[in-house]
């Protein structure tokens, strides 16, 4: 796994340089929250996937580093804005930007980060520039669509599992898929192989989000880095809740709905009670099965790509690791 | 002024086509506010300036139409987000998006419009693409910086006229300047001429914003399309207020500060009273002189450009018109 560590170093080095460049920028009220957001850390999964995908096709990884960074910045921009909309108080155990500063600053710092992400993606080799920008902007639009669907679900009583999978496909997965496709394009992949790597990323991303849903309820607060049970407290229509509503008999359904519609309730009690219903109905195992299904589908696409087996194994290792962050 | 009308038609045609394309896009909760924003109309000043600048250098105007539209979309995106931050209830006599829907939707529709603006700007001829994107992203960042400075001024007691001019230069003028520079680049302008057209736009933009400050207080609500005196009600540090604070003696300064710091005051009474102080101090005439200064500076840059006199006159005519929207 030597390459993977080297790739991570490349990204960290570039991110650090970028972060330093923000230090004396004015107005500091605009740039401090960007610096703060990047300092919170993260797995840098998207830029890593870009570099891995570029390398998979024997591309020159150094040409993909700046665009990769652009994808990380874009991801962080979406977190800034999503946290406002989701009213999230914490991100990686630290106050979110709209809590530490205010919503206006979170909107505008986010917008600025968004432009900066373009400035990095634009540093793709000129020969790939148009194609890379097409993937990037299409992805960015879809991420917005996914977030909007997610918000729409809040007031929608009849969300289906199918719609939910579509939503997380847009909100989470296309960015992983797009990050990989951009790496593949810069790496010189054939069109059909770039499509396979996209589908690999898309399915992996859906598996990843399903795992996120599970961790939000069944993970430990320390490791996940945000409030556990936050989805339950906010009645978020996750795979677990939708499946539970599908599975529940009349009485369990009423119980669930009572928890969802009662305001002025102790959040800890609510989380524990809904969690107990989930356990009673066995929806955790069902979510895990669904997650596994998408994970395996992603590997099928990876297998279709005719490339160095070692490199393919490395990508599989990365994906496996991702799927086992905490069970 | 045949060209000007033809240019406006080109833009309206493209905007209409784009607007129609939004009609069936899902989720409609994301795309309806974009459609609504574009349907509010507007002078389409920025795309017009792009086409005029392209034509000034005998460029192929049809190559600049899509990027021009991108600049209009970018402008509208900034309005969406600014209106949230400024808590503006009206835009062109209609409810703002965050009032008609909500802030979350205004944030996200704005983000989407932002990506769409990139998608249009990206349609510049490949030979100019990198240069156009450099101008566009630099401009976009500066617009964010200007908006942040504007917000910072709210809680800052010692804003100077110099800082104020810097702020409006970023918040308003660089986009006019950038729109023209992009048109000039696509039109094949030499570097020094593209710089002159940029400076023309920048100075014109500052003049334009100073006029906006004047109109907000002394214009009529119907023609301006938003609440008159809104800047006074919100204690906005405009050129008029800053100049008035500079000019006022101790008593007038205290009177002004009393109006600014008293909450629970009748807005109509406040506007009338502060307006009376402005009139007493003669700051309207001073603002007009300052505006004229920047306007004339802009024309000096225009004169430096060696191009067809007729076309230059046309641009002057456009600028003059801009400066006389309502006195």
Image (tube, coloured by chain):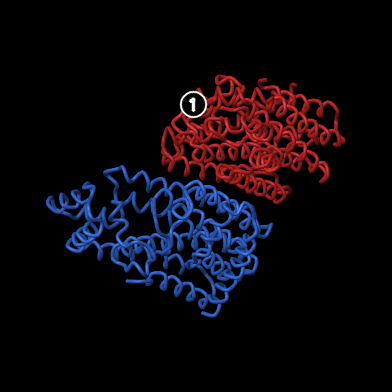
Chain colours: A blue, B red
Q: Is residue A99 left or right of residue B199?
A: left
Residue B78, located in which quarter of the rendered image?
top right
User: Which of the two residues, A93 or B10, is positioned nearer the viewer here?
Assistant: A93
Determine the residue positioned at 58% across, 67% down: A54
What residue is disc 1 on? B267
- Disc 1 residue crowd, few under 14, some 14–19, many 20+, Cα 10 Å: some
- Callout 1: residue from which chain? B
Residue B289 sits in quarter: top right
What is the x, y in percent for residue B77? 55, 40
Question: Measured from the top left, where is residue B43 in percent x and y?
Answer: 62, 27
Residue located at (61% from left, 57% from top): A121
| Residue lying furthest bottom | A2
Give the number of callouts: 1
Label 1 sits on a secondary structure element that is helix
Which residue does the image show at 67% across and 26% down from the upper left? B281
| Horizontal side of residue A197 vs A249, given as left or right | right
Rendered location of residue A89, percent (x, y): 39, 56
Q: Quadrant of the C terminus of chain A?
A: bottom left
- Of A102 and B22, the residue lying toward us: A102
Q: Residue furthest left?
A: A251
Q: Nearer the viewer, residue B314 or B51?
A: B314
> Is A19 or A190 nearer to us in this picture?
A19
Left or right: A88, with A97 as reference point: left
Q: Residue furthest front?
A: B251
Residue B135, image x, y percentages:
70, 47
């Amino acid at each position: 796994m030597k390459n993977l560590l080297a790739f991570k170093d490349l990204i960290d080095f570039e991110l650090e340089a970028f972060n330093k460049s923000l230090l004396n920028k004015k107005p500091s009220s605009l740039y401090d929250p960007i610096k703060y957001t990047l300092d919170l850390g993260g797995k840098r999964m998207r830029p890593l996937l870009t570099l891995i995908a570029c390398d998979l096709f024997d591309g020159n990884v150094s040409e993909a580093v700046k665009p990769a960074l652009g994808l990380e910045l874009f991801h962080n921009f979406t977190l800034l804005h999503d946290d406002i909309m989701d009213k999230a108080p914490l991100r990686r155990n630290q106050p979110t930007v709209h809590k530490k500063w205010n919503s206006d600053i979170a909107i505008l710092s986010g917008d600025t980060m968004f432009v900066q992400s373009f400035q990095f993606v634009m540093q793709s080799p000129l020969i790939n520039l148009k194609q890379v920008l097409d993937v990037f902007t299409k992805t960015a639009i879809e991420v917005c669509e996914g977030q909007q669907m997610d918000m729409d679900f809040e007031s929608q009583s009849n969300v289906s599992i199918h719609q939910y999978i579509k939503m997380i496909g847009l909100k989470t997965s296309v960015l992983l898929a797009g990050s990989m496709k951009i790496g593949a394009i810069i790496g010189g992949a054939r069109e059909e192989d770039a499509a396979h790597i996209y589908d690999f990323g898309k399915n992996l991303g859906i598996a990843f989000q399903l795992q996120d849903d599970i961790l939000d309820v069944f993970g430990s607060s320390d490791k996940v880095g945000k409030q556990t049970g936050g989805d339950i407290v906010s009645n978020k229509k996750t795979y677990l809740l939708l499946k539970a509503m599908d599975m529940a008999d009349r009485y369990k359904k009423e119980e669930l709905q009572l928890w969802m519609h009662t305001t002025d309730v102790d959040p800890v009690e609510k989380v524990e009670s809904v969690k107990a219903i989930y356990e009673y109905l066995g929806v955790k195992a069902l979510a895990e099965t669904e997650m596994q299904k998408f994970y395996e589908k992603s590997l099928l696409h990876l297998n279709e790509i005719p490339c160095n087996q070692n490199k393919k194994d490395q990508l599989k290792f990365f994906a496996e690791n991702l799927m086992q962050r905490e069970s």
